[in-house]
Amino acid sequence: MNRFAPYVFLRDLASRWDVLAFIVVLGLIAFLGETSRGLFAPLAQLAQTPLSLDPIHLPEYAARTTFRMLAALALSLLFTLTYATWAAKSERAGKLLVPILDILQSVPILGFISITVVFFMSLAPGRVLGAEFAAIFAIFTSQAWNMAFSFYQSLRTIPLELMEAAESFRLSPWMRFWQLEVPFGMPALIWNMMMSMSGGWFFVVASESISVGHTTVALPGVGSYIALAIEQKNLEAIGWAIATMLIVILLYDQLLFRPLVAWVDRFRVEQEPGVRVPDSWALTMMRRSRLIQAATVAFHAAVLWTSRAVKRTDAVTPPTQDAPKRSLDLLWVSLIVAAVVLGLWHIVAVLVKNTPLHEALQVCGLATLTMLRVFILIALASLIWVPIGVWVGMRPTAAQIVQPIAQFMAAFPANLLFPIAVYGIVKWKLNPDIFLSPLMILGTQWYILFNVIAGASAIPAEMRYAAANFRVTGWLWWRKVALPAVLPFYVTGAITASGGSWNAAIVAELATWGDTQVQARGLGSYIAEATTAGDFHRIVLGIATMSLFVVIINRLFWRPLYYYAERKYRLT
Amino acid sequence: MNSSPLLQCNDVRKSFPKPDGAELLVLEGMNLELREGQIVGLLGRSGSGKSTLLRLIAGLSEPSAGNLRYLGRPINGPASGIAMVFQSFALFPWLTVFENVALGLEAQRMPRAEIRKRSLAAIDLIGLDGFESAYPRELSGGMRQRVGFARALVVHPIILLMDEPFSALDVLTAETLRTDFLDLWSEGRMPIKGVILVTHNIEEAVLMCDRILVFGSNPGRILSEIKVTLPQPRNRLDPSFRELVEKIYVDMTARPSGGGPGRQERFPGLGIGSVLPQVSSNLLAGLLEAVAAAPFNGTADLPKIASDLQMEIDELFPVAETLQMLRFAELEGGDLKLTEDGLAFANAGFDERKRIFMRHLLSYVPLAAHIRRVLDERASHSARKSRFIDELEDFMNEEAAEQTLRAVVSWGRYAEAFAYDDENAMFSLENPT
């Protein structure tokens, strides 16, 4: 159902837990920001070999960038397997962990990069290492929450009989985890991983070169290369960077994700009818290679070996008695209360103390501007892509060609294309309030397109024949057949596009070309400006406001719309 | 026959807590004994708690009261000598046939060579030779369930538990699998010493079991125990086989010994708080027509009409009982006998049918009458769904309340007694007769 949705909704979350989670998360951010500010001063300029715009270096830069991606992926996987498992296994922990995840999905980490950069640089003794950590962490935040959510949902939906089979054959918890739970969650997890890649590329480009106050960190990579090209107004270099990125993403897709998706198909419990078994030349190659085969066998043996090595508890855990459970509950609740109080205190300390009322109002106004932009852009993109998506989706051959392209475009970091647009705006002196806006949706509009394509190709043939048989054509056909049928898919795509656009606002509303700066009024440029100025309380205020807006819009608009569409228009 | 039983259940009782703190009783007064060489069948409709009992025996859940003993020892958690075969097979799709079979031994940390030997032997025994490296999705339903059997047998269980193992298969495949299983059983080629089979198929129970426990619902309990002494292999067309099937139908439709009218049995209380089954008006009309027509002419023998209409008891009984509740038919002694109005309905035209149905719905289904009364009394002639759900939840859990209301909505719509708008969750008299 959520195959195309990096942003995952959960039904029936108690709303008070959301509020608590929100406070805890914001408190943490405020805390991080505060700590970072204290550690900010001693940081000096990083002395490194300067970056070069010579395209000869691009392969190396691309390799460095790719490495960051892989490291973040590994971290996200580790986080997923632990955090989501904990949340799913312990009812008590889940009550807090799940809403926290939900809020984290909505926090625009892009605006938060400046804080994490400083934070990680102060943590690590070697400074480049710290900056690397910060960049990796930024990518991590663009994937980990979605992946954890997906795995959590999988763990909660394992068919009862499979669980009973595992239990009645007395698999140890460790064995059950590796033989049942992980394989079961794998398809959704891999799919989510692939879908959140676009965010990852976006973030790696944005986080490699970052200026906070007087500190500039430029890690060798494609993102820094682009930043330097912008600084030197070198259009040719930007072209090179874009070409490099295209190749990198293509390789990543072909060598990593296609094989993974094809391989993971075996883990599907139920084969949805009509879904083409994915194929991958790379997987076929690996399967036929003896070396890879040996590695797989070794891995399987390792899983079995650890199952034997890990101590097995034969006794079934007896149902916990009431008395200790209650006291544990009490302890748990008091811990949460303590966290909430701490969070509140930090928010009060960092925000309220430093924020005059008029500034708070101004930020809300800016957020409204950005919100308006996002909605108008989503509407415009929908007007364009929904008809095209339906048209393509109804034609299987066209869909087979367009669908991978759309997915590829979604994965491409749109911020690489920003300089070209900014160059145009500067050259022709266009109004940045209007012409910077499309950049926000440049990378995220594709979600609308490929979700709609998927929806249109899922319309049952009989329904289309019926429509043709009763000569339902023209506008009536769109109104009664096509649009309702693709609505659930469209909403999924629009939610993702909207979330991504908020994030992109931070880099899209304030853009530079050499020493020229173009700025659109909005919350994104507010955060970006605060970042450049190294003004931490304004960063936190901006991020908090943006998170609040995103959460509220999700809760009041997208989520109800999503359930309405699922309930009324989902063809099953 | 050995003197000590393999398995004993004494006064087992199981209930689940309801959200309001009360408990929902699903199983009561369960006494059961399994001796060596026996196949015991638990026969009943869905909701009669037979699967719940099986899970208690498997150690997958714990009884609220009473005790279960396996070879004289109390059962707490899955025991090593008890293996289970599942209705939906419950195979791990990412493991091959061999790996699926080996998993149970793997969990016991048996030496690798031993695992291999025993797994291959089990695969061989159950007729899966040549399929060792196949994934479950490549197999047909019958082959998948064979893997289910091999996986259960490979751990050399003493007792085999089967949870409707043939009900997800088509008729032919199911019959082949049953015969194969019975052959292996009677030839003593399986390590198992006793079998418990959960089923809702009466013929399957008579075909396979030495003893059949007939379950009743609300709460689940044993209605009667039937010994099957026919020699194996049994023949479905054998008169004594038919006779047994007939007898079980009679048992399952019998009025409780308490004396009251039979419908009290399955619709306890029959106030507004009784749980209503989801049976469409088409099914009701269809069964009425079938019974009214030749060769039944108003009175149908249940086994006969079940096989004529190819309905399992799980499908047939709810329809027959709904007809009984609506006073369109009487259910007794294994027969379904139409009332005068039932016959009139079967012979009536479209509009007349709706009128008869409306009269019976409002007279004999208190919830329908209640909804209609509320709508009549209100000036707006409309009422929220939540109002009735709240009332129902005083008597039943949330899920049952939803189901009951869905059932009454569908009947009310057919009778045109009231209208319901799902979008706004509102009842109204929009199109009253």
Image (cartoon, rainbow, N blue to C red):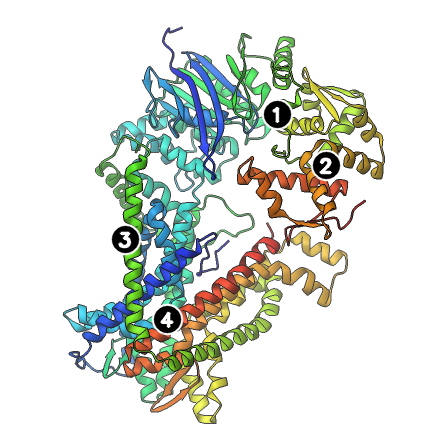
Pair 2/1: label in front: 1
* C-alpha span from label 2 to label 1: 19 Å
Please determine if labels 2 and 3 lie on a single subunit: no
> Where does residue A363 sit, x and y in percent of width and height?
41, 79
Q: Indicate the quadrant where residue A142 lies.
A: bottom left
Nearest-to-viewer mark from 1 and 3: 3
Q: CA distance from mark 4 to mark 2?
A: 56 Å
Helix or strand or loop: what does disc 1 sit on?
A: helix
- Helix, strand or loop for disc 4: helix
Whether residue A172 is situated above or below residue A77 in the rendered picture:
above
Disc number for residue B266:
1
Mark 3 vs mark 4: in front: 3
Mark 3, residue position:
A335
Which percent across, then down, holds residue B338? 77, 23
Label 3 neighbour load within 10 Å: few <14, some 14-19, many 20+: few
Q: Residue at x 41, y 86 (%)?
A: A519
Q: Is residue A308 left or right of residue A15?
A: left
The image position of residue A531, as x and y in percent, is 31, 79
Q: Secondary structure at mark 2?
A: helix
